[in-house]
Image: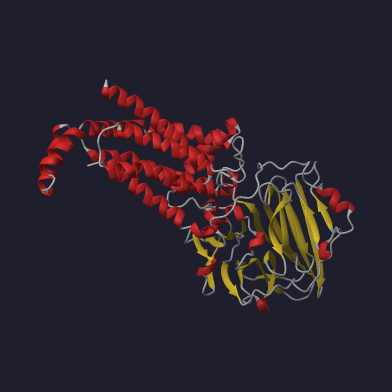
Amino acid sequence: MNSKNNILLIIFCLFSFIILSNWQKIYNYIGNNNNKISNKNIINIDDKYQKSSNIIRNNRIVIKTDKFILYINPYGGTIEQVQLLDYLDKLNSKKFLILLRKNSDFIYQVKSGIIKEDNIKKIKDFYKNSKFFIKSNYFKLKKNKKILRVPLFFIKNNILYVKVFTFVRGSYLININHQIFNKTQKPINIGIFGQIDKSINTPKKYLDKKYSNITSKIFDNIAFSTENNKFKKYKFSNIFKNININTNKGWIAILQKYFTSVWIIPNLPKENTIYIKKLFNNIISVGFKSSNYLILPGQKHNFLSKLWIGPKIQEKISKIAPFLDLTIDYGFFWFLSKPLFKLLNLLFNLIGNWGFSIIITTIIIRLITYPLSKKQYITIAKINLLQPQIKKIKEIFGNDKERFSKEMILLYKKENLNPFSGFIPFIIQMPIFLALYYVLTSSIELRHAPFVFWIKDLSSEDPYYILPIIMSITMFIIQLISQNNYDIDPIQKKLAYIMPIIFSLFFLWIPSGLVLYYIVNNLITILQQKLIFYKINN
């Protein structure tokens, strides 16, 4: 019996599943750069909008904070485009990432407004055909200010409607306050809604091709949280009918790989409704609507709501709303991915490099699991030492499988050896490996994160495939050490030599940060095996 080859076979199957599930989407790597945005490489935004005669694109309102630039349509106050100033659209680019946009071939926009009593069930935007009055078409959060308020006004039938956008320095959270002033002699019934519209199909030109192979399964998802369901997620393709859920609190979001747009439901005395619907023009529409409220003559009412547009930063979104951090897809082993990320983040804050953080994390993990690893290597060494006896038993009882098995069991009992104990480190190692895979592919902090030399993005594959080759060499060395020159089955021996090559092919498209982890893990394995085998043989 040789558990080592069985382990290799199981690992092969697991990685085959991971890679083949994305095989048709293998892509060519384009460009390299780091994740820091240099002011020298980016056009000065203030100069662009203050000096250019094109300050208003299609008469839209432009708002600039330290985190993003928003373009708002004065008809309805719809947010039609958002540029994130801390993120580039792709590696080796001089353009900011555009998260929301409204083009002829693609729509991803955020609406909010009021709904009157006669159309509250249909979510008809009362603002839509009304142009807001504004004091300026360009608003900027000044360096000495922490808060920027942008009010929009319009009056209809002696009712004043005010829509105030509030931005806070350092935050992607937008507070929206709908103020209704009833100057009439009659009471009015009014509610509010918040809505996100997105085209079902995203044109390839708007996607970062570098991430499309390993992340397509988590693109275009809808997620929400209610009082009775802390987290629920749907793929766009699984929306076949309209969904309506009543709740007093929660949130609803459209998710992408690293970014999201989220309506946090206002905590109102009356019940709200979360809705998801598929429109006839291939657009998914999600949002919330409140119950209607009675505003008496001469009175006013404020409807407060919150909107997050930006990256899924775990530390920040977890404070915005309960369970919002679950929008970060850490997979089945999320309970391992979260502490792994916290450890990586802690190390990054100390040393300032995600690659070295991965190396130190690997060392810490191997130190913790060393007692189990030691037991595995001792088992392998003892099995190698027993090869002459195993060969002799095979020669005598090779044709009698039942007797051969009994003799092998007796031999292992005599030597106080359990060959299956070698599986324990493997069982522990694989969940950690998969958990780190999801950390590297789902954490915005690792997007475009450089290591050293040619590795400019640890969340994508090695552009020159050097790391997979090094990993293959380390695996080959481990095979040589494990076999220890004992006579084994020729087929098993050839398989042991072929496996590193196969693995190197699989790892060509695995995030380079994960390959780095595996290389360090293998180097530690080689060192530990050498020391343990030396002690046993001497």
The one nearer the camera, 89 or 279, is 89
| Figure quadrant of the N terminus | top left
Residue at (68%, 41%) from the top-left corner?
A: 36
Residue at (21%, 34%) from the top-left corner?
A: 387
Residue at (42%, 31%) from the top-left corner?
A: 524
Q: Position of residue 151 (x, y in %)?
A: 79, 59
Residue at (80%, 62%) from the top-left corner?
A: 152
**Residue 501 relative to residue 375: left or right:** right
| Figure quadrant of the C terminus | top left
**Residue 229 relative to residue 287: left or right:** left
Q: Position of residue 66 (x, y in %)?
A: 74, 46
Q: Is residue 536 above or below residue 77?
A: above
Q: Position of residue 180 (x, y in %)?
A: 74, 66
- Note whether residue 238 is visible: yes
Most extreme residue toward the top is 538
Q: Position of residue 115 (x, y in %)?
A: 68, 72
Most extreme residue toward the front is 490
Color style of the picture: secondary structure
Displayed quadrant of residue 490: top left
Q: Is residue 117 above or below residue 83?
A: below
**Residue 9 relative to residue 131: left or right:** left
- Note whether residue 412 is visible: no
Displayed quadrant of residue 370: top left
